[in-house]
Image: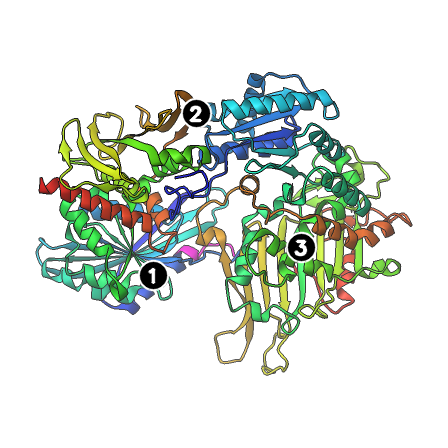
Amino acid sequence: MEIVDQRIQVPQSLDVEAVERALAELWQQTAGDEEAEDGGTLRARVADLMVFVTSDATLTETRASVRDLALVHPCRALVMLADRDGESSDIEMSVSTFSQRQRLSKKVQLSCEEVTLVARGGFTSELPSAVIPLLVPDLPIFLWWRDLERLEDQCFQPLAHAADRLVIDSVDLKELGFGLEALSQLLDRQGREAIAVSDINWARLTSWRALLANFYDVAEYRSLLSNLEEVRIEYVAPEGNASSLAPQGLLIAGWLASRLRWDVEPNSAEHGEGLAFNCRQNGKKLRLLLKRVEGAEIKPGRLSKIELFAGGSDGASFVVTRTDDGLHLETQGTIGGLSCPGRTLPVRNRSTAELLAREMEILAKDIPYEDAVRQAARMIDLVDKR
Amino acid sequence: MTENEENPLRSGTRLERTAEPCVVVIFGATGDLTRRKLVPALYRLARQRLVPAEFAVLGTSRPEMSDEDFRNKMREALVEFSDEEIDEAAWNSFASGLFYLPGEFDDNESYNRIKNKLQEIDKTRRTQGNHLFYLATAPEFFGVIARQLGSAGMARNTPPHWTRLIVEKPFGHDLASAQALNAELATVFNENQIFRIDHYLGKETVQNLLVFRFGNSIFEPLWNHQYVDHVQVTNAEAIGVEGRGSYYEKAGAIRDMIQNHVFQIVSLIAMEPPTSLEANSVRDEKIRAMRTVRAIPSDRVDEFAVRGQYGSGTVLGDTVPGYREESGVDPQSTTETFAALKLQFANWRWADVPFYLRSGKRLPKRVTEIALQFKKVPHRLFTDSDAPLQPNVLVIRIQPNEGITLRFGAKLPGQAMRIRWVNMDFRYGSSFGAKPPEAYERLLLDCMLGDSTLYARRDMVERGWEIVTPILEAGEQPAPDFPNYAAGSWGPQSAFELIERDGRRWRKL
């Protein structure tokens, strides 16, 4: 596939008609040389995607992701750069279209249109009023908020209000306690303020969650979940913060705790081999351990292993491990000293754009995620209080 | 937490559904279908975590082979027939669950060995006693394999363990043989254990028919005799018999395509809304619609059906031989490679709305589509327009370029009141970049989950044969004047006459 990228500056800023005219012109240029047998280039759009970034570097990276996203979700992307610390300058707009031309047939297959808006200094607060009129009506609206530390930004509220779903990436959370609490409050909003949230970092955990759920899908193994005595979650330190907990580790812990109804005991967080919590499940004691490990081939902040140990007469364990090369997940189970069939599956290592595309397939609230965030926020609160 | 409680790690999640632990036993494991479709589909399901670790495949067929040989052959097949790169670690993990047993389909001892092997696999791979038997053999073995499975005590469903049977097409050669096969299977398996595969139903666009009709409120009010003039279903292939001449000689277009795939599509178009998406709810409505198809009078078959056979010609720029010159084909063959039918429904919704169906090989291009042609406006208002008023058409394209097109009239810009006919297109490929799963992946997973919605039920199969019986009987005498259409054309002249005598035309595709 060859990506056709065309871009022009919009002569008049903050003029919806000028933007629409500029896009129409680009589309006409793209479609101009198409043979008409199948109707030429299609201007398909299945969603509106608003993206909010705060640095030029993130803008470049985001535009690349949006282009990749067009492979799956043709959409109108409205990409905003809010450079608050820059010298004040009014909003500048440019429009681009991305099309894919098949190498052999030369047919243009799938397309995406992007409007980039750059505001600096005091003009950043005007971005929502410039962007919202550019949304294509009647399509689901996603807001990809790329500055997770600033959910209180004055642009956030009007943009979130216009959106059907907020997309974040909790891998960017630096202050876990503050960030998870803010996220938790956002999830608790009710009525017209309520918004569904997708977390790209949660999407990265899908394989882990699926393998754990798969194992206990087998009716014979399910009762083991009631007899868990210890759960160990190992992770690689997040980027730029070697001593911090990885959000992935906390999210998976929060998911297990909320799904399996563990009560995390107050004042139970202990630092030792890792960060340990004492929990109770139906009155029985259970130890949850989050441990940082080294993993040269594993990306920072990612999980490397989850082990569940159950007691009872026979004793049982189920382990999911990321292989040393980081490319596969292996499962291994034992019950009463006998092995269960294991398997090796490729880690999909999806790009941010691919993960975002999957998140854009859903519009409903993701209840297990929300419960996991709330539980993770409670757990990190216990750590902060000690 | 007990075995009967829902898995708390699964509840509320949007994780994809996963099959239960089981062994898939493939009869005909060295055949083309296993190599081309079944094992690649099972491998992809395993790679996508859609089957559990407690999963195995037991292949059986005549040739002697070890487990290791079977694994190597399947790996070669995957390389040959899959466009994806093989992940070695994932393949090795999947292949450790592949086993093979040589055996004759009619030999009791073979089934004792299969039974013992299944017990062993259930133990070592913890497959929980769930067994899916896949008959990927020539149809003459369907009955004998089912009987042998019954005699060996392997066909019983003893909850919580399940036993299911997938039967490939062709399901019978005519009504009597289909009834006989159904009756034979029914002596061993219950109907809810039998899954008759029709890979057309596994296609994403066919499944989308339900969403399109019953997930949108704007089309259903128009979906009846008040607004629809007629329906056309076209299933055209540019290819010939592709080396399968000896098989096709016994089949022909009516048995191979119309009686099963095309009728399945027609039933989805004609059915009333089901009360739920539960398998029998959908299948009840499909058969209810098909039961109202008027019988074709045996003395007037020509008014309702046309058979054709291609001679030599040019297709997509290549000169190709006629059917009778293909390998494995009788030089005097009377097998039809083209069929066109006019069906009429005796029900309220479709009163006086004919369904015209055509299916054939060596037609100008590959296309499968359904077109609903709406009635013309009652009064011609635009008398100055130079073009005659055209009817609106709704086209549901099944392959290739899956999508939906609505044709309507629009004013041509300018001073004069001129109308031009324009298409409003929706194409899957343009709106959704995600690659749909292969039909066999979907169908195998459905069967492992016990969902028979996309499988053909006994009554539907027999009804299909009932409808075409007068055409099959009429086709045998007198001998048809074949070949009657050139390869690369849209079928014999009589196919055009079939629709034109009603004042209508086939769509130009």
> Dot 3 falls on which chain?
B
Tell me the quarter of the image containing the N terminus of chain B: top left
For label 1, the SS is: helix
The residue lying at 41 percent from left, 30 percent from top is: A345
Residue on which disc 2 sits: A340
Task: Locate residue B316, reporting x and y percent.
Answer: 65, 45
Amino acid type of disc 2? Cys
- Determine whether B391 is above or below B205 in the image: below
Relative to the observer, which residue lies in front, B281 or A145? B281
Task: Locate residue A249, reporting x and y percent.
Answer: 24, 36
Task: Locate residue B222, reporting x and y percent.
Answer: 59, 70
Mark 1 and mark 3 on one chain: no
Q: Is residue B146 visible?
A: yes
The residue lying at 68 percent from left, 19 percent from top is: B63
Our reading of the magenta stretch's main secondary structure is loop
Tell me the quarter of the image containing the C terminus of chain B: bottom right
Task: Locate residue B470, reporting x and y percent.
Answer: 83, 54
For label 3, the SS is: strand
Q: Please indicate whether residue B442 sits to the left or right of residue A124 in the image.
A: right
Q: Can you tell which mark lies on residue B394? A: none
Q: Can you tell which mark lies on residue B234? A: 3
- Sequence-first disc among 1 and 2: 1
**Residue stretch rendered in magenta on the structure:** A30-36
